Amino acid sequence: MAKIQNRNKAVSVNPLKSSQPLGAAFAYLGVSGAMPLFHGSQGCTSFALVLFVRHFKETIPLQTTAMDEVATILGGADHLEEAILNLKNRTKPSLIGICTTALVETRGEDFAGDVAGITARRTEELAGTEVVLCTTPDFEGAIEEGWSKAVAAMIEGVTIPGIRNRDPRKVAILPGWHLTVADIEHIRDVVESFGLTPVILPDVSGALDGTVPEKWIPTTYGGTSVEDIRELGTCSQVIAIGEHMRAPAEALRQKTGLPFALFRSLTGMKEADRFVTLLAQLSGRPVSAGIRRRRAQLQDALLDGHFHFGGKRIAIAAEPDHLYQLASFFVGMGAEIHAAVTTTGASVILEEVPADSVYVGDLGDFEELAAGAHLLVSHSHARQAAERLGTPLMRVGFPIFDRLGSQHKCTVLYQGTRDLIFEAANVFQANQHEHTPQSLNPFLNRENDHDSSSPSFTRH
Amino acid sequence: MSLKAKIEDVFNEPACDKNQGKEAKARKKGCSKPLTPGAAAGGCAFDGAKIVLQPVTDVAHLIHAPLACEGNSWDNRGSGSSGSDMWRRSFTTDLTELDIVMGQGERKLFKAIREISERFSPPAIFVYSTCVTALIGDDIDAVCKRAAEKFGLPVIPVNAPGFVGSKNLGNKLAGEAMLDHVIGTVEPEDVSDYDINILGEFNLSGEFWSVKPLLYRLGMRLRVCFPGDARYHEIASAHRAKATMMVCSTALINMARKMEERWGIPFFEGSFYGVTDTSEALRSLAGLLVKRGADPALLDRTERLIAEEEARAWAQLRAFRPRLAGKRVLLNTGGVKSWSVVHALQEVGMEIVGTSVKKSTVEDKERIKQILKDENHMFESMAPRELYAMLSEHKADIMLSGGRTQFIALKARMPWLDINQERHHPYAGYSGMVELVRQIDIAIHNPVWETVREAPPWDAEGNVSGKDELAVSGSLEDEAITTPVRLFRKFAAATADDMGEC
């Protein structure tokens, strides 16, 4: 069980986190025809927007209530109303997803009351557009929390309550934010191969998968339809992926009575086995030859790949569920977690991370803790640490702005685990340090030898 | 000397125990068993020659052949170089059909030598003949001689075309080329009573660099470590050493013996694999040097160093005992490595459940026998199917072998460690032994084994048994893990032979 430790210091050096409203907006972006709206000053939106664009290389619909000095003093409800009406008129979205920011949260307003008032007053004007709200101040949480809150908000605001007629073939999937476009597509394929119909919320695979539409669309295109969110109660089973999806799954259960199965990770043989078994049981169908073949390929990848992981020290900086997914993967391959740094300390998954300690910190802490590791695993901002430490960086998560195609890397189920093995093993192979007369000289290496005179064993 | 005479000469090796145990007639036939078409394994004589010479770092290695000989085999060895990287470049004459038909081979070779000498100016070029160029009668000796005069650098012919025999023969022919053309051609100016040669050490993964500092601490000086990290001028002046250690006995015994004959350099066979073997090697080197005029104080120095280093190594190895004691090892490799590694592994409490002795000498076998106490654990060679069966029945916990049997172990879901030339870890010397044991520990305890041995939760048709309580609110992480079931899987009979030592 990992000990969760806070780094007690005033200054954050090279932040690891992206802000909570960004995470919420990210979730709204997985809904078709959606328009995320930051309730804050212009900068809040523009920074998030730029980061999204750098990562996805797409136009990202993201709007702002553009709080100015006067609104900040007198209250932002007018700005909120104006923004909603403007968005409705100009982009005709099917959903406006409001994320509050630190500015308005610090000021402290009754946003729920404001929104209720606006939608009640403007029923006619807003017909055909759902307006949902989540409170996501920047001063707490990070992407994970924001995403989780936005999904819960959409369920609470849009899904029809009550126990409905359930379609035994319909399965609701609530993926965590750290699943890529390729992950979502792969999960959909696997679920469909059992003759089941997946309803995925949010579904970034349709919205952020880098396609070229025939016309200009100001909102998101692709993703979960608002109608599907409304009809979630007609599914027969919910599958949540990642501990941070427990809250939305719980919200859905409260609202519709639907049972949920929570998978903390879908990476790794055991996890994939459980997922596939669940689908086979839900559908009553056998596991297809194709999936069985993927499993056999993963077995071989485990065998071929493990040589490169044994005895390696890995330093990971990522959001809690992502950290758990990656750390479990590396430890399962025979590596050990040299340093684990995460964004926020609230998630229960952190205790399950297979490391001695998990530090809630930044990339500055990461750089300190990662010294001596063979591999850094984090997003693009860790590249400076990688350069200074002379240690290779495997880019995962968000943002990845200096490599292309991160959204199309599959990391889940048999196929994704296989690819992940190859990706990491290739980083190891590309960065093999050649032995030198100095590095092997038994007399020279004696000084630092003392700390390791009891040879370091791999932890399992 | 003609190639035929050379081969006969090489086969008639008085320093080889195996050879001397034979009848005069059988001795003449040589040591390579005739190959069985369709059931042969291992490399050819060219392969053997190139393996031996390729680690010489500053030399340009030029292969006179159509593409396959070099094109399919280059950049495949992990010897370390502390200087030039010339040896890693691949040079071949890449003969075309037209070259062969029109008899352009010699001319192309000559031009190739010129281009190399002009563009890369290496201190020497080694030219290798191959099946095709030998067959069409290209006289590489003559071309090398002319080129050497013309371009003013040593151009050394290596006559070991593939068809003349096995890889082992090629090893020896390579040694002959050095004896005939290189060793003794440069007189060193700094001869001392402490000069030694190490022959048959390949410096794989730079592992000799863990040993060299030990020698230098004792005040010894290396004339050459051949071929690992060797430079041309070091080989050329190797004849002034006072003592030689032979590391890989089967490969270069002729070289050691002839150096003793010609220049009076005594030699012994030793190994840097294993703690006691390393000590023994240091002791023998010191002993030989003292006999040849070095200050006897060297002996005391050596004993002191051995005592210190052994104590250190044992202490480090002891830490692994709790994790490795009782683990069963299957050693599937030939040559000297068998007994020295067997000894070392027993030192950490591991049990040897089998070792191949295919390339071991009578003496090696005797040594293994003494260590193992059970002769049944020795085998000449094992068919892949048997090997697979043995591993999949879990009669061992790990196999140590060369790359060729890697997949037999892996497909049987059995830990495996490469102890041959493709490996990436240095295992020589005291620190190397600790590294080997550390790697065994890492391999055996990798959690991946449990994962790959786990049977899928469905039957052969993909049917999931029973409708368990899976669709529940909450998490699934407490699901019971299905018990591991090992599946026996047949696969094509590849070669189980571990060719390719040295």
Image (cartoon, rainbow, N blue to C red):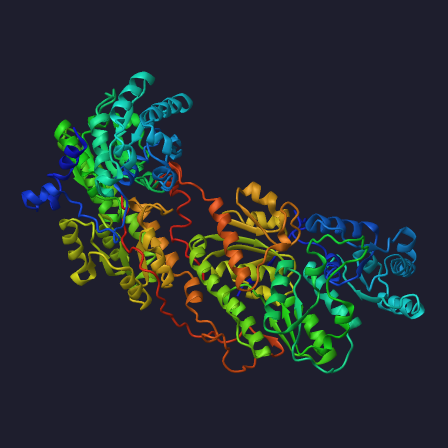
Q: Is residue B347 above or below residue B220?
A: below
Quadrant in which residue A23 is drawn: bottom right
- Name the spot of residue A358 as percent of width and height, x first: 57, 59
Along the viewing direction, whichever of A108 and B369 lies nearer the viewer: B369
Residue A176: percent from the left, percent from the top? 65, 64
Q: Is residue B209 above or below residue B153?
A: below
Residue A39 left/right relative to B298: right
Please state which of residues B399 and B121 is positioned toward the viewer in this rendering: B121
Pick the front one: A287 or A93:
A287
- Percent of width and height locating residue A260: 64, 76
- Locate residue A5, reporting x and y percent: 59, 59
Count of numbered circles on the image: 0
Does any portion of residue B63 appear in the rendered image? no
What residue do we see at 50% from left, 54% from top? A422
Q: Residue furthest left?
A: B24
User: Would residue B215 be visible to someone looking at this image?
Assistant: yes
